[in-house]
Image (cartoon, helix red, strand yellow):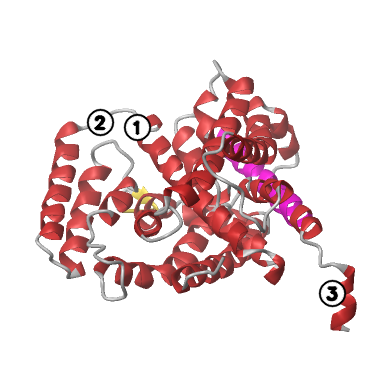
Amino acid sequence: MRLTKTFSAFFQSEKAGGLLLLFVTVVSLLLANSVIQADYIAFWNTEVGHHSITHWINDGLMTIFFLLIGLELEREIYRGELANIKNAILPIFGALGGMLVPAGLFLVLNYGTATQNGAGIPMATDIAFAIGVLSLLGNRIPSSLKIFLTALAVIDDLGAILVIAIFYTKTIAFDNLLIAFSIMGFLFILNRRKVHHLAPYLIGGAFMWYFMLNSGVHATITGVLLAFVIPFGDGGKNTASYRLQHILHHPVAFFILPLFAVANTCIAINPDWHEGLSHDNSLGILLGLVVGKPLGIWLFSFLAVSIGICKLPNDLKWNNILGAGMLGGIGFTMSIFITLLAFKEDGEAVITYSKIAILIASFLSGTLGYLWLNFTFKVPEKRLKSKK
């Protein structure tokens, strides 16, 4: 299976972005536990316009990340792997299993407790990290597995967005929500009138974000909604959707996501940090990401093939799908994002323990996925000898 130029560019961007995320996360954790700990953590909590710097990153800049996710999802639906329903069914089923099984395992431990709201945390996959780890395996990985993991992660992101919109919205100010959707309706009319300049959509999107922020629905949802009213056309290089997606790739991968990682992993790790891992919430996150993700992705993919609604690509085996499922357990960005929403009223301790559990689970998932795929795609000894 040949990779399109758009997908290849996307894969390379996510690959480099994932490696950068790993680097800045380690640096942030080191600074947060160094001699400058107090000043470093205080900086991210500095208030600017009645909100902390971290808050502006999470509710403001991350909207741009969700805009890019929306544009990528739209492209996948119209021209990518999801355009062909037969090709799309396998990653769709895999993504469903990768959301439902981890959430179920989390709820087994946390249902009826104060932390049951965190069920969405292990449902997410960090596409940048997952692709970054996959890229370390080089050209041995078939393009079909790269496409499967990428499509699965994009669908996963859509699932996470729906979870945020439905389950993490407490109170709604319907007047502001109505204004936000009215602006969206106006932008849709511009789309149908074939207005291809980006300016009115971006300006309208900024107003949409403001009213969505004040509606009670999480403001980052604006990014996804805006993506689907920006003209897609034939998806070519001259379309508004393609131009904006191309513009956003590098700023998101190399600035917004690293900044989010730095701001949200400045965690002061106390000597008794390991005690938090025994909490049902932390155990639910660890179990959901490390066990639930690969189990759910493999099980639902196997089910879809077994009942005959899709087939496994010829160059893949079921142990390869299991390895991709392990990489799906790298929650990181989206898992931390959902943690902040799920436990914003439960105190800093719960959030800190959840972040530590996410970091450990993501590290374990990435390491296990790399080792497993490295073993399953091991270069045959004959080929190694022929290269010498």
Q: Which residue is mark 3?
A: 383
Please give the range of residues in magenta: 348-371
Give the quadrant of the C terminus: bottom right
Question: Of helix, strand and loop, which one carries label 1?
Answer: loop
For the point 68% across and 44% down, the residue is 361
Work out whether residue 4 or residue 101 is closer to the camera in this orientation and state it.
4
- Magenta stretch, overall SS: helix
Q: Earlier in the sequence, mark 3 or mark 2?
A: 2
Work out whether residue 148 or residue 66 is closer to the camera in this orientation and state it.
148
Question: Of helix, strand and loop, which one carries label 3?
Answer: helix
Point out residue 2 in the picture as x, y percentages from the top left corner: 54, 69
For the point 35% across and 54% down, the residue is 63
For the point 69% across and 40% down, the residue is 290
Q: Which residue is mark 1?
A: 169
Answer whether residue 356 is magenta in the image.
yes
Q: Is residue 197 toward the left or the right of residue 28 in the image?
A: left
Give the quadrant of the N terminus: bottom right
- Quadrant of res 12: bottom right
Q: Residues within 10 Å of mark 3 (few under 14, many from 20)?
A: few
Q: Amino acid at mark 1?
A: Thr
Q: Amino acid at mark 3?
A: Arg
Task: Please tell me whether residue 178 is drawn above or below residue 241 in the rendered image.
Answer: above
Q: Which residue is mark 2?
A: 172
